[in-house]
Amino acid sequence: MIWGDHGWHLGEKDITGKNTLWDRSTRIPLVFAGPGITHGGRCQQPAELLDIYPTLIDLCNLPPRDDLEGLSLLPQLQDADQPRERPAITSHNQGNHAIRSQRWRYIRYADASEELYDMIADPNEWNNLASDPKMKDTIQQHAKWLPKIDQPPAPGSMHRVLTYEPSTDEAIWEGKTVKRNDPIPN
């Protein structure tokens, strides 16, 4: 099995770095080979890094576990067209989550703003469809997968984590308070 770190923006959408929920920042290479895996298969369905451990349990014929959040990818490794039980979920700081199905990327931020992209028609995520009334059902189908438990930052880490305070509509980054229309602090 081979995997790598997640992506990096090189100026797209005026971002340099990897701290977004867009596809370019969240995709990684993930390759499996060996017994029980179809040779040359290429699955186009989203997966999560949380899926690696349950997959290795299945591939190694270890006793199954029911306390893991990830899903085994063994069905997709045996048949790349096998449907996945649920979309992949990515979180970035408290309240910011992306739900990635095969066709769609839905993002909801801590301030309740939303983005929806058709990853087939718009793989660079330029056209946010979230405000289109025709997309209401698609948004609802994806929003149901948003995490029910959304833990705050670990004690002592808030200076490194972007947080959002809904009562004041302010974000806090590295100890600096930012209002919605303020420029991004240096």
Image: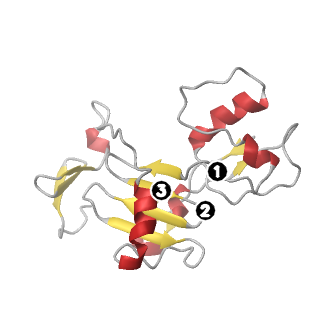
Q: Residue furthest left?
A: 168
Q: Is residue 51 left or right of residue 99?
A: right
Q: Residue at x 78, y 46 (%)?
A: 77
Residue that label 3 marks = 99
Question: What amino acid is at disc 3?
Answer: Ile
Is label 1 in contact with label 3 (beta carbons under 8 Å)? no
Residue that label 2 marks = 102
* Mark 2: secondary structure: loop
Q: Is residue 127 left or right of residue 23?
A: left
| On screen, residue 134 above or below 15 | below
Choose mark 1 or mark 3, whichever is in front: 1
Q: Position of residue 47 (x, y in %)?
A: 61, 50
Q: Position of residue 15 (x, y in %)?
A: 42, 68
Q: Residue at x 40, y 61 (%)?
A: 140
Question: What amino acid is at disc 1?
Answer: Arg
Asked if residue 10 can be seen in this view, the reply is yes
Is label 1 in contact with label 2 (beta carbons under 8 Å)? yes
Q: Which sits in the foreground, 110 or 11? A: 110
Q: Position of residue 56 (x, y in %)?
A: 71, 32
* Mark 3: secondary structure: strand
Mark toward the start of the polypeptide (1 vs 2): 1
Question: What amino acid is at disc 2?
Answer: Gln
Q: Quadrant of the C terminus?
A: bottom left
Q: Name the image quarter holding residue 182.
A: bottom left
Q: Colour scheme of this structure image?
A: secondary structure
The tag on residue 84 is 1
Q: CA distance from mark 1 to mark 3?
A: 13 Å
| On screen, residue 149 above or below 7 | above
